Structure formats: structure tokens, C-alpha cells
Amino acid sequence: MLAMLALIYWQTVIYTTRQTDETIDAEITGLAEQYRERGLAGLVAVINERSNPERGSSMLYLLTDQRQNPLAGNLSRWPDLEVQRDGWLRFRLDPAGGKRSDGPHIAQATSFVLAGGVQLLVGRDLAESTAFRNRIVQALAWSGGLMLVLGLVGGIVFSRRALARIEAINRTSDRIMAGEFGRRVPLKGVGDEFDRLAQNLNAMLDQIERLMAGMRQVTDNIAHDLRSPLGRLRSRIEVALIEPPAPDGSQAERYREVLQQTIGEADQLLATFTALLDIAEAEAATPRAAMAPLDLAAFAHDLSDLYEPVAEEKGLRLATRIPAGPIEIRGDRHMLSRAIANLLENAVKYTPAGGGIRVGLETDGDQASLTVSDDGPGIPAEERERVFDRFYRLEASRTTEGNGLGLSLARAVVELHGGTITLADNAPGLVARVSLPLAPGALPPPQ
Amino acid sequence: MKLLVVEDDREAAAFLIKGLKESGHTVDHAADGRDGLVLATTERFDAIVLDRMLPGMDGLAIVAALRASDNATPVLILSALDQVDDRVRGLKAGGDDYLTKPYAFSELMARLESLLRRGSGGKTETKLKVGELEIDLLARTVRRGTAEIELLPREFRLLEYLARNAGHVVTRTMLLEQVWDYHFDPQTNVIDVHISRLRQKIDKGFAKPMLHTVRGAGYCLKAA
């Protein structure tokens, strides 16, 4: 800013200086012409004309003879001239000869010697241009000063504002760390960097809250849903120990039976633990999974192939509608096979004999959609989200085998792959739709 | 067979050794990594059962050390870590099989015996013969006696695996892993149904069954 002001000042100086120089030069040119055409008499006349104070010009003229007696002009005598560096002459102008009474002015001039020893002085009172320059300087100084003040004030105001915003964020963070986990950083709503920062912080806090809720849920689940089977297991053993020995000597057989059942229960529990750990790992979204190119078409074929006899055994038709492929995604085959197998197993488990299951695969833009649909009893609309909760079982299926973790794991795995899983009415039945992003650069097969 | 068990948990080791001895093997035991490595390098074993979490040395480091000294003794790794990543790492380090704890003893036995069999030469055959069952791996045809049996591709793969392990128990997990390359625990009896399908094709109508169910363990293809 200041540099600009300096520039303006400098330009102004140059301009006024040049103007003076040019004006004087122009005058001289004009006078020279008059002298050529009309001789000395003509020159005298022109000078007298131009020296007329009524004209109000700041030009100075003096024509003298060789003894410096004035012949024409508006200067009373030949002044004391100083030769300046730029080739021009400068002299002090008496106020009496000048127009103002505010002290001596400086004048800029040049002189000539004409034929016959006649001397001519042509100059300009610099007072006006000096005054002009001063006014510019004043204006510049004022604006400079104003800018400085405004800058300072603005700077203070802005930094106070910024500090206040940061302070707000700090205060909120302190409260959150002290335990108020529901708090969020306030947004001003103006969409500036501070708002963006606040938004990001809030998003992080949401994520933390989700993870904490997930962890709480797991411990709750473990407490409740794992205690029951363990309790059962324990009771079974306890009862067998309390029972009086059978008189017919078949006690060993009885014990054997109980032990066998116990192993079965223990295996179930272990499966549940494994499933819980898998879900936790998938949800933590820091997977140690091996994401590699995976052909979803082949994948869907293989899995359907594995479950086809199971379906048939139960009296169900398993149909597939899978295009030729390859339909490439980036995924972990092991985790995905677990997830989709859960969907297939559910379909087989809950569809009554005579029904049908279908595995479908299609692409839509940059997404691949894998569906497992059946024409069984389906899931009522209001439960379609809750079934993804750990250990959640529909009332109707409480007695069917299973630990209620299948869909939880399916969702955790699918989301880990950047996809979504939704349930909908297959009218009748259920359709589970898994959407996964296609691998970048993958071309869907021609439909 | 001469086996080495490297396991620091005393009770687990006791169970394991008892079971292995009862199956007719001679068993040596090391309770920590360093001892295990010393034994493994100074004596000849037919197979090693190695716990991954050992005091003094990481089980995987032991396997890597063995392999680095050109010791190709088959190693079965036991671990409580069951993530796919861990399995991959175990196999990459040079392990031949990876079993997660807790395991069914029958599972361990079946896999161990599979490892022991593997040790004896890796010839690539084009035909597998089990009793009167003949499997042509190139033509992808199967015949039992004089009868030609039509199998679906997946049934063929299943039979091939059973035939390669003929006379020995293969567990459901082994089948799911080796024939289908899946590593999850199915809630439904998928494998059982596939076996039953296969059974329908190769045993039905014949005098003696070849595909047997071994209760509590798995299945076994045996010459009639």
C-alpha cells in the first residue's frame, strides 16, 4: 500500500516537473516564431501581451537590452540565477513581483541571447505546481495515515474475532473431554475456514461417538447374550453331576451324551465370539483385510454353487441371474464370502420348502449390485434396520438356530468395502441388496 | 511318526501329546521357542506342531529360521489369532498349515496326517485310483469298476480331494478350505449335503460304500 502511495507521489512529481518544462519549452518555441516573423518589435509586443497580469498566468518573461535594462516582461529586473543540475535556471521570485504574499517563490527559467545583445528570460513561477504537489502529498499522507489506522484497527478486530472462534472451539473441546460427549463445536454458519474446521471436528466426534457406542454395545452383548448359553452349558453339566447314577449301568453313556452336547454348545459359543471379533474388526475400519481385485461374477457363481445342494436338500430352488463378467471390484474374498454366505444361509433357513431363492448380480454406472432374494416370510418394514443390530432376532425366529450376528457381520464387511446393504420387500419375501463400488477403470460387461 | 510339539501351555501340551501318542506317534516336547528350535535343528522329525505365541521366540520366527537353514520339515502352526491376515503370514513364513485355537483334536490329527503324507514325495499323477474307483484327472472322468460316473465340476473336485487323501479322515473345514477356498464356518451343513450328493453318485447301487462318515471328525474315502 505504502509502495503504491510512494509511486503516486513520484509520478506526480515527474508529471508536474515535466509539465513545467514543457510549458516553458512551448513558450520559447512560440516566442521564437514571433521573433522570426515580426522581429524584435513583434517579440516585445507578444511579451507585453502575455505579461499582462490580468491573464493570470504563472509565466515569467523578461526582455532586456545588452545592459540589462528591461524592454518588456513582467519581471522588474534580471534576477540572480542559479544553474541547476538539470540544465534549467532557478531563481527566487520576490513576492512584490509575484502574485501571492506568502513568502518568496521559486521560479524555473531559461535564458537566451538574441541579436544585438538582447537578452530574453522565459520562466515559470513554480508556486502553483509546488502547491499542487503539496496538496497531493497531503492527500497521500492522509490516505496513508488512514490506511494505517484502518489496517491496525481491522487487524485487531479480525484477530480478536479469530481468537474468539478458536476459543469457542477450545472451550467445547474441553467440555467434551470432561465427559459431555454429546456436545459439538458450534458453527457460525458463514461457511468460512473456521466453520469448516468446526464441521470436521464434529464429524470426528460423531465417529468417535459411534465407535464408543459400538464398543458399549459389544460389552453389553457379551454380558447378556453370551452369559445365557454359558449358563445353559453349566446347568447341563451340573445336572448331569447331580443326577443319581442310573442303576442299569448306562451312566457312562449318559455322561458321554452330556459331554457331547457340551462340546456342541461350546462350539456355538466360540463361533459367536469369532463372529463378534470379526464384526469389531470390520467396523473399526482399519482392516488388516487383503483388498485385491475380485471378480464378483465368479464369486457369486462359486458361492451359489456351494449352496445349491443345501437349498435343494431343503426343497428350495436356487436360481442365479449372473452376467458373464468379469465384474471387478476390490475386495477381500474371505470376508465377503462370509458376509454373502450369511445372506444365503438366512434365505435357506427362513424360506419354507417349495420356495425359491435367487442370486442376482447387475451393474449400474460405477456400482455393482449383488442381490439375494427369497419368497419366504420376509422381514416387516419396521424391523428391516433393527435386524442389523448384534444379537437381534425377530420374535418369529427366536427359536431357530443362529446367534443373531449374521446380518451385523454382513453389514460391517460390506461397509468396509465401501458399499451398502439394504433389505426390501421382495413381494413376497425378502431381497437383500449389496451395492459395491466397481474397481476404478473396470468396464462393466456389455449387457 | 516322530513328532515335535512346541507349546508353552502345559495343559494344552499334555492333551496334545497324549492324543498324538495314542494315535501311535512318538512325541517330543519343547516348552519354549529356543528349546524348540534347538530340538528341531538337531533331530529329525517327520512333522512339527508349533504354537505361534511362545516365550523367548515368536513361533513364526522359528519357522523362518528353519526354512532359512534348508529344513523342510512340515510345520503345523497353532494360534489363537484367527484373522485371515495372520494365517497368510503364518503360511508365508514357511508354515505348511495353520490351525486356530481352540481346535477339535480330530481336526488337528486329520491335518497333521495330511502333512505327513505330503512329505512323502510330490509326484504329479494323471490318474488317481482308490479301490475300484478310477479318476482320470486329464479327461475329468470317473469310473467305478466298469460304470462311468457323471459328476458336476464341483463334485469332481470334491472327489479328487477325497481320493488324494484316501484312507484318511478329512474334516469339513479342510474340505471347505481346499476344495472351495473358503475360510468361514458355515452355520448350515453345506459340506454334508455336498458329500451326500457325491455319495449318491459313487456309492449308490454298488455293493459296498466307499465314502464313509467318521463321527465327530469328518469323512473318509476308503477302498471298499
Image: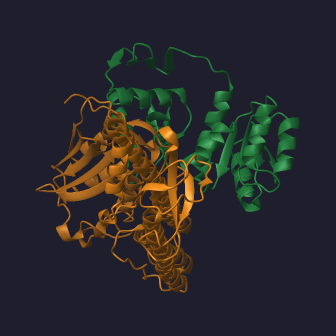
Letter of the chain in green: B
Q: At which x and y percent is residue B160?
A: 46, 26
Tell me the quarter of the image containing the C terminus of chain A: top left
Residue furthest to the left: A427
Give the residue drawn at x 82%, y 39%.
B40
In this view, A233 is above or below A34: below
* Viewer-closest of B20 and A252: B20
Left or right? Give the position of A272 relative to A359: right
Count all numbered tags in the image, as a single digit. 0
Q: Is residue A286 left or right of residue A308?
A: right
In the image: residue A19, left or right of residue A88: left
Nearest the eye: A413 or B171: A413
Which x, y percent locates residue A81? 59, 56
Q: Closer to the camera, A399 or A289?
A: A289
Check the image and report above or below for A146 versus A269: below
Residue A418 percent across, percent down from the top left: 38, 51
Which colour style is shown? by chain
Residue pictured at 30% horizontal, 62% vertical? A55
Nearest the viewer among A283 and B215 is A283
Identify the chain drawn in orange. Answer: A
Rendered position, A328 above or below A49: above
Residue found 54% across the figure and 67% down from its top: A255
Q: Give the quarter of the image for residue A259.
A: bottom right
**Residue A228 in view (yes/no):** no
Is residue A8 depicted above or below A182 in this figure? Answer: above
Say left or right for A244 vs A225.
right
